[in-house]
Image (cartoon, rainbow, N blue to C red):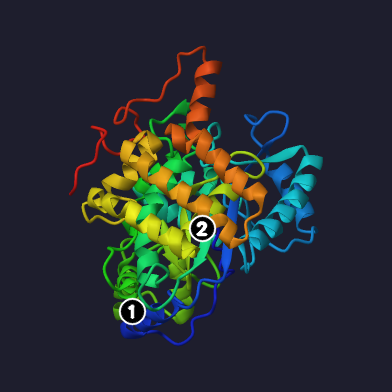
Amino acid sequence: MSDSAGGCIPPRTAVTEAEVEALVRGICFKTGPPRRLGVEVEWLVHELRDPRLPVTPERLGAAYAALRTVPLRSALTTEPGGQLELSSPPAASLMECIGTVSADLDAVRAVLRRDGLELVGLGHDPWHTPRRFLREPRYDAMEACLDRTGPAGRAMMCTSASVQVCLDAGYEEPGPLGHVRRWWLAHQLGAVLVAAFANSPVAGDRPTGWLSTRQLRWVQIGTARAGGPALDSDPRAAWARHVLDAPVMCVRHDSGPWQVPDGLTFREWTRSHAPRPPTREDLDYHATTLFPPVRPRGHLELRMIDAQPGDDGWIVPLAVTAALFDDPEAAETAYRAVKPLAERTHGMPAPHNPLWRDAARDGLADPELREVAVTCFAAALRALPRLGATPDVVDAVAAYADRYVARGRCPADDLLDELRTTAGGTAAPDAPGTHPDDPHPHGKDTPS
């Protein structure tokens, strides 16, 4: 989620509505052969001796100061609630990406352990309430903006973590690796990835009724800030419209608090020039305040996967996603497998459609999602050796497929089993639609 864009940039030349559309269309999809891969791994930071104890800001600050002295190849950033994120440099291969991030994580963990802290792979903190660690104008404005739609924004900022996979946009031409196909595939396969890797069923020390509570938070934040554009045959045009019609989170200033307009879209800002004319820098910043599940930033950023358990759990979703997008045979198999799922979206954008909500709530207990996941994991396993994956990586994906996918389970199910055990068998997930977190009181979605 980290998109720190630095401090305020003094206004320069104003941009017009037409210029904004041309700029967005020109930079959001940079096409060419898929050659680069990246990953952004977010982690909750907990006390090593007892993860239920809150980590004081002073302890976090001291640990992060020590981490800034550690040489890393990945970019290390801090999230608003004190989560840590490592963003890999663009890698020429899957194994290069894994090797870089693994080495950096080893170095980070060693420093944190000396301070009695650990990295924890959970999509949503099961115990702690949102508490902001970073006090910066960007996050002050973000909090004020997101508070208008309820508490989900603070939870997303401060208690969530993910594995974000970054892929090249693909070829200009049609085909399994063409950018139009990859854009469409990301939005349909994304629901399968949500279901297969759901790992956040608990908040406030109780089940929420959703296997991915992190994904629930994005649904609760709403379509304007956390929704994707409508899918059509021209991804560039669709994304340009989405950026122009999305509400402005904040207007930055050199001094004093940033303004948080209510309902002002970027399109309206280019027309009204109030409270000041928008600039190219404002446009670039505005794009970082939109959080759809698939975000085009020259490459495609897939943002829907929960943080995974274990030191190396993040490798499996990275490897599976890379295989299904960058191997032509696996990409074609995935496309054919997910195509029937599109009917369940009712034409509504992700993640605010029935398919994505079923995936986040039910995971692979959904028979159709389970069947598609089995097909996609099998295709990924066949493709990974062609992408140069080592036997260890292939074995990790195969073990995950056996432990979870083939059985219609995900890591969230393990967490719920553990919670039931510690509660003496009395704790069970709330039925869909009965938990106050559920935005749909009757459980299932209906198209609007």
Distance of label 1 from label 2 (alpha carbons):
41 Å
Which badge, 1 or 2, comes first in the chain's sequence?
1
Location of residue 280 in the rendering, given as x and y in whole percent from the top left corner: 45, 81
The type of residue carrying mark 2 is Ala
Where is 40 relative to 174, above or below? above
Location of residue 380 in the rendering, given as x and y in whole percent from the top left corner: 50, 52
Snapshot quadrant of residue 13: bottom left
Report the side of 113 relative to 426 (left or right). Answer: right
Where is 411 relative to 390, above or below? above
Q: Does residue 369 appear in the picture of this structure?
A: yes
Element under disc 1: helix
Snapshot quadrant of residue 260: bottom left
- List the residue tagged with mark 1: 270
Report the side of 6 relative to 174 (left or right). Answer: right
Disc 2 packing (10 Å; few <14; some 14–19; many ≥20):
many
Report the side of 195 relative to 418 (left or right). Answer: left
Q: Which residue is situated farthest in the bottom direction here?
A: 13
Element under disc 2: helix
Number of marks in picture:
2
- List the residue tagged with mark 2: 323
The residue drawn where x is 49% and y is 81% is 11
Location of residue 134 in the rendering, given as x and y in whole percent from the top left corner: 60, 53
The residue drawn where x is 39% and y is 84% is 15
